[in-house]
Structures are given as structure tokens and as C-alpha cells.
Amino acid sequence: MKVLIQIFTAFMFSCGTALAGGSFEGSLILLPKDCQKTDKRICRLGAPLRYTSPGGKLVWQADKWTDGNGESGTTDGASIPEWAQRIIGDPYDPSYLKAAIIHDHYCYLENHVRSWRDTDRMFYDALLDLHVAKAKAKIMYYAVYLGGPHWVDLVPGQNCGTNCINNVAPGGVRFEGDQFGGSAFQAELQRVKELVEADDDISVEKLEQRAESQKPGDFFFAHGSTYSPTGPDDPNIHPQM
């Protein structure tokens, strides 16, 4: 009996660890007051907001950051274009706003400290931890995976001797802003909405594969989080804003 109890306890502990969800810390404070109700609907974060990924793997924190011009970083909620709000909802919907704020922070060029794939997956996990319906979370994840900001680090070339570098890179990041506009993207998101609502058990991996099939040869889908240019004239090293 003692052995059975030990086995059962170990089993429950391992399951609890595997199924442990992520968690948020901190209060969501948007400044100035009622900024989400103004015409521009641009807000600043008034206090740190932290999210810990499932299993405690990664910790993500948004706070009063500054952009490249020294101005306070801002958010427009979930960055949902007006046409897509009928599919997803209001950008400042409290049911998913915390996840959107954290994602927004790490999509700022100055905050690209983790890969865009990790950042998007964090967004999906955070949505689930906020108890957003699984189908809706997958639709939102698909939207950012296909049309959200993408980036890779450009890594230095390999040294081949004194004053010799045979693989030149300027350093920094290649960046592509969001691609939420356009009738083709709108039509695709509507199709995926219908697909996911018909089968909300479809895996995120299948959704990723579908997204990548929509943009064959895309630089960001074809590469990981870093890229080594082949020379200073490599067309892939120039940032796309």
C-alpha cells in the first residue's frame, strides 16, 4: 500500500507539473485615465505587468518602457484593425487585454529580446490562461503568426584572418511590421475563423503550417531567430519597416 501511495503521489505531482498553466502578476493600469475611450485610443502602461509562461519556463514583463525616440512606449490594446473587430472583438476587451499588452511590449523594435515565434506562442498561452475560449485564442494566434510583426537577429560574419571577414553583417535586427491590412488577409482570417469554430481541436502546429503556406518563400518563416548574411549586399539584411 505504501508503494502504491508513493507511485500515485509521484504521478499526481508529475501531471500537475505538466499541466501547470501560466500566471499574471501586477495590476493593469492604463494612462492617462480613460485613454482607451478617446478617439486615438493610445495608452501607456502605468505599472509593471508580468506573465510567467506555463511551467515557469519564461517570464515576460511589460512596464513603462521607452521607444527609440525616448518616448514612453504605448499600446493600442490588441492591435485589432476595425474590420477585424467583428471577428475578434474590441482591442481593449478586458478578457484578453493583459495578454495583448505583454505581446505589444515585446513586439516593439526596442524590446525584441526574444524571437517572434516565442513571443507569439506566449500570446497564445496567455490567452488560454486568461480563460479565453480555445477557438478564439487560436484565431487570434493565427492572426499574429501570419500578419503580426516578425524579426530576426543579424549575426556577425565569420572571421577568416587579419582584417578578413568573409561574411559581413551590419549587426542589429531585420524587422517587418504587422501586415493586418489587405483584402487577402481579411478573407484568410475569416476562413480560419470558420475552420477553427468547426474544429477547435485543430492544433496550433497545423495553423502555423497553414499560415506559412500563405506566404511561400517568406524570409521570416524560412529562418529561425538568427540569420547570417552572405555579404554586405545580401538583400535579406535590410530591415523592412
Image (spheres, rainbow, N blue to C red):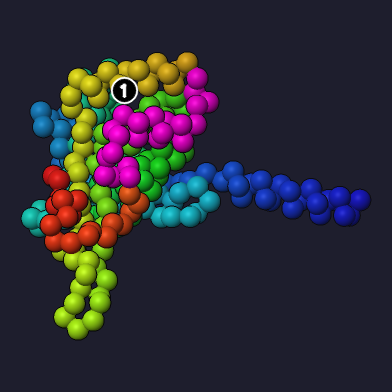
Query: Which residue is rendered at x = 40% and y = 25% of the image?
Result: 136
Q: Nearer the viewer, residue 93 or 57?
A: 57
Q: Nearer the viewer, residue 55 or 152?
A: 152
The residue at which mark 1 appears reads as 189
Q: Residue furthest left?
A: 69
Tell me which amino acid carries mark 1: Leu
Magenta part of the protein: which range?
Answer: 199-222
Query: Which residue is rendered at x = 37% and y = 20% of the image?
Result: 193
> Where is residue 227 shown, x and y percent of the image?
28, 57
Q: Is residue 219 visible?
A: yes
**Element class at badge 1:** helix
Q: Would residue 4 be found to the left or right of residue 186 on screen?
A: right
Picture layout, residue 46 above or below residue 89 = below
Picture layout, residue 183 above or below residue 118 = above
Q: Tell me if mark 1 has few (under 14), some (14-19) or many (20+) residues whose alpha carbon lies within 10 angstroms of its own.
A: many
Q: Is residue 97 visible?
A: no
Q: Would residue 93 be found to the left or right of residue 40 on screen?
A: right
